[in-house]
Image: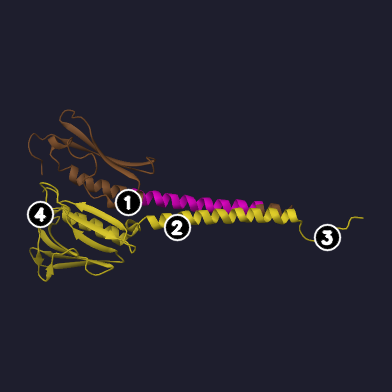
Chain colours: A brown, B yellow
Amino acid sequence: MEVLAALLVLAVVITTTMAMFVERQKRMQTANETILAYQAISNEIEVRRRIPYSQLETASPNFITDTAILNPLSPYAATVAVSPPNNSVKIVTISVRWRNGQRVERVAITRVDTGGSGLW
Amino acid sequence: MVNRERGFTLMEIVVVLAVFGAFLWIVVVLTADMRAWQKRMPVNFMTHPAITAVVSRLRKDVQDAAPPYYRETYGNYSMSNRMLIVYTLKEAGTGETVVWDFSTDGEVTRRAFTDISGATSTWTAHGTPTFSIGDFPIPGSPDSVRIQATDKDGKLAIDQIYQPRPH
């Protein structure tokens, strides 16, 4: 009986310690994955900002930039969606999904029809 | 009169071993899982202050770049995949030529030469990964800079594209 009681106490202590350790690892993993995803997204934004307004819908729905940095997240989906124009404004949403869609990071940028060429 | 012997019963030993075995199994599974994750992910360099500073300062220099943007040579320095020479604007509106030197492993040096006085300022970051510099041509916007860094296992850990901003 004494041995079992001691084991029970030991089990609680060890389980709690391991749960904390595992939780830390999960959070670190989440942070690392997020950093990789946002690097790819910011690179894609640099390109999508410079595509002419009239060509946004016809541009590839997949990332134009290199997505090699996302390899550790495989399998992943890196997509771009363009909303229908609303008062000469289009919303371009750039997304990265991984872990079978459980994790998603996305950024939406606003493109405005300037009536001519790009502002830069 | 009952004659009890000292020690543990077989059942107690079995229970203890079973509990201990379960703990061992959990530890082994968790360790294997974490090891597999570590092998898959690159080192997160962004937690390193010096590396974050390199990336941030380089981004600022490129985004504030002004014509002629980049120079093939400046003094004894030549543009390569381990060296970037960029002409950038300072807060006061004057310009400076900045040489980003990635040629020494584990070290990144930023040398700035001002237009007016030619004075130099040097800043060095240590403990950095191997950086390389390239470009990523964007139609109608050919002045991009692409900075990449790999960890010691060759996994791509930093990959960023920067563009000069309009002034």
Residue B58, horizontal then vertical, whole percent: 21, 58
- Closer to the N terminus: mark 4 or mark 2? 2
Residue of label 4 = B66
In screen coordinates, is B114 left or right of A11? left
Location of residue B42 (image quadrant): bottom left
Q: Position of residue B129 (x, y in %)?
A: 29, 64
As drawn, the label of residue A115 is none
Measured from the top left, where is residue B152 in percent x and y? 33, 64
State the image quarter where residue B158 is shown. bottom left
First to last magenta residue range: A8-35
Do the residues at discs 2 and 3 belong to one chain?
Answer: yes
As measured in the structure, the alpha-carbon distance from the residue carrying label 1 to the one carrying label 2 is: 17 Å
Amino acid at dot 3: Glu
Q: Name the residue that disc number 2 marks.
A: B35
The chain letter for the residue carrying disc 4 is B
Q: Label 3, on which residue?
A: B5
Q: Which secondary structure lies at badge 2? A: helix
Which residue is at the front of the view, A6 or B22? B22
Q: State the separation of the CA atoms marked 4 and 2.
A: 46 Å
User: Mark 4 touching mark 2, by CB under 8 A?
Assistant: no
